Image (cartoon, rainbow, N blue to C red):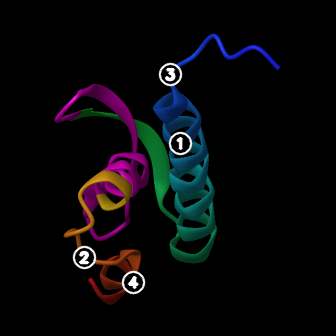
């Protein structure tokens, strides 16, 4: 197979999909709403909870995958 993309692009796509999946599970469990929000890298998918918490599970997943120092997703369910 001939590769036309940088190896990292596949990891980014997988991580993006994982962030979307985690966000959808969170949305269903906590009645959050999807929308767009400003992020460190431009407009991103984000969630807003009934309590007013706004966050981007996609951005969080990307930062967690490439930085590793971000907290786990579990803390969102605590707020």
- Dot 1 alpha-carbon crowd within 10 angstroms: few under 14, some 14 to 19, many 20 or more: some
Q: Are marks 1 and 4 in contact (CB under 8 Å)?
A: no
Residue at numbered disc 2: 71
- Going from N to C along the chain, the mark reached first, 3 or 4, is 3
> Which range is magenta?
39-63
Secondary element type, mark 3: loop
Q: Are marks 3 and 1 in contact (CB under 8 Å)?
A: no
Residue at numbered disc 4: 74
Q: Which mark is residue 78?
A: none
Farthest right residue in view: 1
Farthest bottom residue in view: 78
Above or below, 51 relative to 79: above
- Going from N to C along the chain, the mark reached first, 3 or 1, is 3
How far apart, in angstroms, are the residues tagged by discs 3 and 4?
31 Å
Q: Are marks 4 and 2 in contact (CB under 8 Å)?
A: yes
- Residue for point 43% across, 48% down: 58
Asked whether 19 or 50 is in front, the reply is 19
Above or below, 51 relative to 39: below
How far apart, in angstroms, are the residues tagged by discs 1 and 4?
22 Å
The nearer-to-camera label among 2 and 1 is: 1
- Going from N to C along the chain, the mark reached first, 1 or 4, is 1
Quarter of the figure that contains the C terminus: bottom left
- Residue for point 75% across, 14% down: 2
- Dot 3 alpha-carbon crowd within 10 angstroms: few under 14, some 14 to 19, many 20 or more: few
Residue at numbered disc 1: 11
Q: Position of residue 15 (x, y in %)?
A: 52, 49
Secondary element type, mark 2: loop
Residue at numbered disc 3: 6
| The magenta stretch spans residue 31 | no
| The magenta stretch spans residue 47 | yes
Q: Position of residue 40 (x, y in %)?
A: 16, 35
How far apart, in angstroms, are the residues tagged by discs 4 and 2?
8 Å
């Amino acid at each position: 197979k001939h590769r036309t993309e940088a190896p990292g692009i596949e990891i980014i796509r997988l991580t993006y999909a994982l962030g979307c999946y985690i966000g959808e599970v969170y949305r269903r469990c906590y009645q959050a709403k999807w929308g767009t929000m400003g992020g460190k890298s431009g407009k991103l998918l984000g969630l807003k909870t009934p309590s007013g918490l706004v966050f981007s599970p996609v951005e969080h997943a990307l930062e967690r995958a490439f930085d590793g120092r971000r907290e786990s997703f579990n803390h969102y369910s605590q707020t």
